[in-house]
Amino acid sequence: MIMKKSIHILACTLLILTSCSNDFIDLMPTSTVTVEYYYQTDKDFSDALTGAYVPIRNQYRNFYIFGDIRGDDSWVEIAKNNDQSYADRFTLTSSTGLMNSTWQNYYQAITRANTLLEKIENAETSTVPNKNRYIAEARFIRAFAYFDLVRIFGDVPAMTKPLSVPEAYQTPRSPVGTIYNDIIIPDFQAAESSLPASYSGSDIGRPTIGAAKALLGRVYLTLQDFTRAESKLNELTSMSYRLVEDYSALFDYTNKRHSEYIYNIEYLDGTAEGSPFTNAFMPNSTPMTNYFGIAGYGDEWNSPTRELFDLFEDHDLRKEISVGIYGGFYDNEGTFVSLPTTTNQTYTKKYIARNSVRNGSPADWKVVRYADVLLMLAEAMNENGKTTEAIPLLNQIRKRAGISEYPTTMSQSETRDAIEKERRLELCFEGVRWFDLVRTGKAYERLRDIGMTDYMTVFPLPLAQVQLINDPAIFPQNRGYN
């Protein structure tokens, strides 16, 4: 996702408040002209679209808290009183700042996409030659935001056009199924039909037809519509995507474009548009800082659990880059250097990238890549009774990892377990584990011993929003969080 410039557009909505007051955010164009005069040229719409991506990029700086730390493969080893540790210990409350910023980010993106879609409707293609692509991108953004929203919060207000203040106050939470059927699926389908297969120049990184297909397949899998999931995901196997030969090459941020790339949230080195992952996930160890050239500043978030560490087979080529070396690292002379006992003893190397500014790393967030597509396709096929066809897809992943392939005689149940295991090993620290646990109904079973209650498959709604509406008939808090 290209984010080399940001532009603020006029958007007023109840759902992007900065506090529980009656003040609204006014996001004006940098030229301060009114929104009516702003949307005139192709560049105007292009810039406004870039502005719609910005809150998504901001949100994904924290997405690991939802996708990884909340699950069983990641934890906050050094306990701290912060959002990361609250998510890890299932003590997040509706007043936690993370809840409000998450709500604001997604609805800000939705509002900007809705505004663009309204303004572009009557634009002539002679004036806006990229009109169809901009519509497809805006609908992709809206579907993307709503997909995350319903997986995080459950029922949420459905907004498909800019709302007035009175309208916003009266917009209730819509059921998850309605959001999927009326917004997420139609929007991804529309994006799929109009997005290009690739881009050139400064547009490289925007969503493609492959990104829309892959995320639509993930939507179907989440809904347990395995027939449509299989059909959609299978379409990507006849496109140009392939597994890269070297797993570690996926995390070389000097080469962000490869055959496995489908869609990333992209960050730029040394700027405010960089990512925090490199520094935030690194143990606070001077020898490690000197060896890798990257400082850990004591955050030490998103660390592999010992359970995940032990799940890897000894010769699995994914192991060292996914979970590092337990308790330390080997220097250039092959000497084992132990980590201080006061720091994390496990760490992931997936986001190690030399960066010139703290929390300004070029390490991107992988939303979906081809290995994920193969694993999702294997899951859908297995659930559709095509186990013997699903196992070779798993074995593509195993072969690259340098470990023995699964026998083709496995039962459907055995294959289901193998798919879960391979998703954990292949995609750890890429924001999928928690959502896999929830969609397969395993979250409570796996996590109740560390604090999860049955209602915690969704997060609490932001207290600021609940208090502002102040009407449980329109905007009730999620069960268990009152």
Image: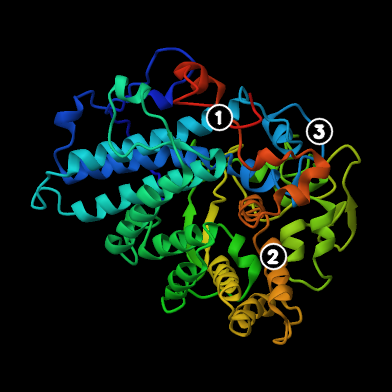
* Tag nearer the camera, 1 or 3: 1
User: Gap in Å between the C-alphas at discs 1 and 2?
Assistant: 29 Å
Q: Is residue 163 left or right of residue 462?
A: left
The quarter of the displayed image where residue 61 is located: top right
Sequence-first disc among 1 and 3: 3
Residue 255 in view, yes or no: no
The residue depicted at 72 percent of the width and 51 percent of the height is: 292
Q: Position of residue 126 (x, y in %)?
A: 8, 52
Instruction: Assess whether mark 3 and mark 1 are in contact (beta carbons under 8 angstroms).
Output: no
Residue 223 in view, yes or no: yes
The residue depicted at 30 percent of the width and 57 percent of the height is: 190
Mark 1 residue type: Leu
Q: Is residue 274 above or below residue 130?
A: above
Q: Is residue 302 left or right of residue 439?
A: right
Q: Is residue 131 above or below residue 405?
A: above
Q: Name the residue carrying label 1.
A: 461
Sequence-first disc among 1 and 2: 2
Instruction: Assess whether mark 2 and mark 1 are in contact (beta carbons under 8 angstroms).
Output: no
Q: Position of residue 464 (x, y in %)?
A: 52, 20
The quarter of the displayed image where residue 172 is located: top left
Q: Name the residue carrying label 3.
A: 79
Q: Position of residue 323 (x, y in %)?
A: 76, 57
Mark 2 residue type: Glu
Q: Is residue 375 above or below residue 219?
A: below
Mark 3 residue type: Ala
Q: Name the residue carrying label 2.
A: 420
Q: Callout 2: 10 Å neighbours few (<14), some, many (20+)?
A: some
User: Gap in Å between the C-alphas at discs 2 and 3?
Assistant: 28 Å
Find numbered disc 2 in the image and state the secondary structure of the residue it sits on: helix
User: Gap in Å between the C-alphas at discs 1 and 3?
Assistant: 25 Å
The residue depicted at 66 percent of the width and 56 percent of the height is: 350
Between residue 77 and residue 359, name the one nearer to us. Answer: 77
